[in-house]
Image (cartoon, grey):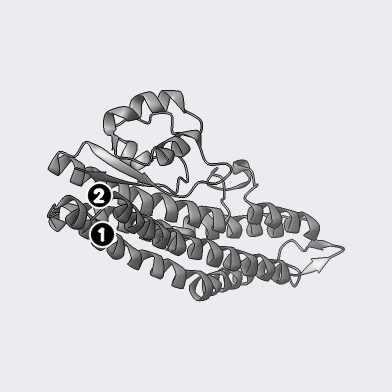
Amino acid sequence: MTLDEIKKLLSGMATGMDDTIDNVNARAAEAQTRIFNMIIKEIENFEISNGSYITGQDYTAKIAEIESKMYEIIAKVYNPAVYQYLKHYNAIETSTIQQHSDYNGIEVDKQKLNPIKQSLYNQSSYYLTEGLADAYVQPAKFVLMQYVTKGSPVKDLRSAIERWDKGTMNAGELASDRHAPRLQAYATQIARDSMYTYAGTMQDVIRKEHGLTKFIYVGGLVKDSRPFCRHLVMLRRKIDIDEVPPLVVAYPDGLKPDTTKKNFPLYRGGYACRHTVMFVK
């Protein structure tokens, strides 16, 4: 197998990763829009007098109903994309093992990769599903209860829900004192970081196990591609891992501050980087 052929296979794997991540992004955006519209509709049907919510009313049941409808939308619109995404971890593992067998002539011990896959799979599974309760749903419930129980104007609650939806709500407005993220941004970042970290960590384990010191760097280039990634892709050759430290110094824009040759397989070109690494003989 030639270098160009293995790069093509690696690019195909990366495209599959991006497709499943983009699907999470799209379905999260759709769910977020539906949830926002539902909440706005529901709060306009609360007990209102002179444009404000009536104090002394028990809004618990109404807010519980909103919560239930949020989870219904998440289950119907968003969760199928997450489950499809999680299944793709097996495809990445299979592709990685096959690529090293075909190009490097290496038999990868699958058992050494399983702990990595299980750990990162469990982490992404939790934050993309159960973790939504604390990160996304509970902040909305807290805001609703705060505004309606103190008799705030309807327009003020609507403004607060708009800030929650856009991810611009101040931490001080929430019970947890944490920023409430947009579902789309939250889910996409976790999906991308977890999957690319998984692919990079497998490469790192294989590199250490088989003493590989060179790598190929694959991915598309766009107008705003980081200089570091642009340089590596344009080299169009096997790159020695010892070339990384001086390149980090020469092209620091967008890289994680503590990028080294040891963590490079995981960090690559920095936040939300869509390039992949494969270590080769």
The residue singled out by tag 2 in the image is: 202
Q: Nearer the viewer, residue 133 or 204?
A: 204
Q: Which mark is residue 66?
A: none
How many other residues sit within 10 Å of disc 1, few (<14), some (14-19) or many (≥20)?
Answer: some
Q: Nearer the viewer, residue 134 or 112?
A: 112
Which amino acid lies under the numbered mark 1 shown in the image of this protein? Glu
| Residue 181 point in image, percent of width and height | 56, 51
Position above or below: 90 against 247: below
Which amino acid lies under the numbered mark 2 shown in the image of this protein? Met
Residue 252 shows up from this direction = yes
Position above or below: 136 against 259: below
Position above or below: 21 against 228: below
Q: Is residue 70 left or right of residue 214?
A: right
Q: Residues under labels 2 and 1: Cα distance?
A: 8 Å
Q: Is residue 58 left or right of residue 102?
A: right
Q: The C terminus appears in which quarter of the rendering?
A: top left
Residue 58 shows up from this direction = no
Q: Secondary structure at mark 2?
A: helix
Position above or below: 159 against 43: above
Q: Nearer the viewer, residue 97 or 167?
A: 97
| Residue 4 point in image, percent of width and height | 33, 52
Q: Residue at x 63, y 70 (%)?
A: 34
The residue singled out by tag 1 in the image is: 93
| Residue 204 point in image, percent of width and height | 24, 43
| Residue 36 point in image, percent of width and height | 66, 65
Q: Secondary structure at mark 1?
A: helix
Q: Residue at x 69, y 68 (%)?
A: 37
Q: Residue at x 25, y 44 (%)?
A: 279
Q: The N terminus appears in which quarter of the rendering?
A: bottom left
